[in-house]
Image (cartoon, rainbow, N blue to C red):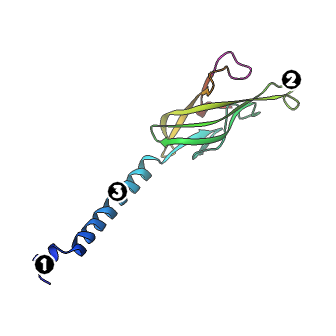
Amino acid sequence: MKFKQMRYSRGWILALATILGISFGGYIFVNRAITTQAYVTNCGIIDYKPTSVLKFCADGGVAIGGIEWETWSARGATGTGKYQINDCSPNCADGKIYYADVQIQLSKSKTLNGKDVLTFISLKTKDGKNLPLSSSPRDAWPLELAG
């Protein structure tokens, strides 16, 4: 088959489309892998996409559990979860735990141990009502200092 005939054949077009598709897909895969390799500090531990985050590491009196991440990158992360707080009445072991559904945002990326680490969390209730045992629908804290 001469080049001129091959140039107009469907096989040639299919081969070119396959090569372009694989190249583009490889680029997207590598780019996403590079831009999403971020971590979060969680009670002194560098963690990747944790399903729970503590505010006070010593007693776990305030935490967010059941976290589902919607976005995740070195620039920040967003997700949803369930905020929980223990009223510690009459003591923390026997206290009542209150819950609220929240939206979560991680920010303030730093390089720690050679990794991009998100070090600040802010949250707000999904329904706009105040967080349990609080006069605000919002809370925020630096994760690197938790506990």
Which is more N-terminal, label 3 or label 2?
A: 3
To which residue does mark 2 refer?
Answer: 89
In the image, residue 132 lies in the stretch drawn in magenta: yes
Q: Is residue 101 above or below residue 71?
A: above
What segment is highlighted magenta in the picture?
Answer: 131-137
The residue where tag 1 is placed is 5
Residue shown at 85%/28% (left/top)?
A: 95
32 or 56, which lies in front? 32
Please state which amino acid type lies under the numbered disc 1: Gln
Q: Is 115 placed above or below 124 here? A: below
Q: Amino acid at mark 3?
A: Tyr
Q: Secondary structure at mark 2?
A: loop
Toward which corner of the image does residue 62 lie, by quadrant?
top right
Amino acid at dot 2: Ser
Q: Which residue is mark 3?
A: 27
Disc 2 and disc 3: Cα gap in Å? 55 Å
> Residue at coordinates 87% horizontally, 32% vertically from top-left?
93
Residue farthest toward the top in the current orientation of the protein: 135
Q: Quadrant of residue 142?
A: top right
The residue closer to the viewer here, 80 or 73, is 80
Question: Residue at point 36% right, 60% down?
Answer: 26
Q: Categorize mark 3 by other alpha carbons within 10 Å: few (<14), some (14-19), many (20+).
A: few
Q: CA distance from mark 2 to mark 1?
A: 85 Å
Say whether marks 2 and 3 touch (CB < 8 Å): no
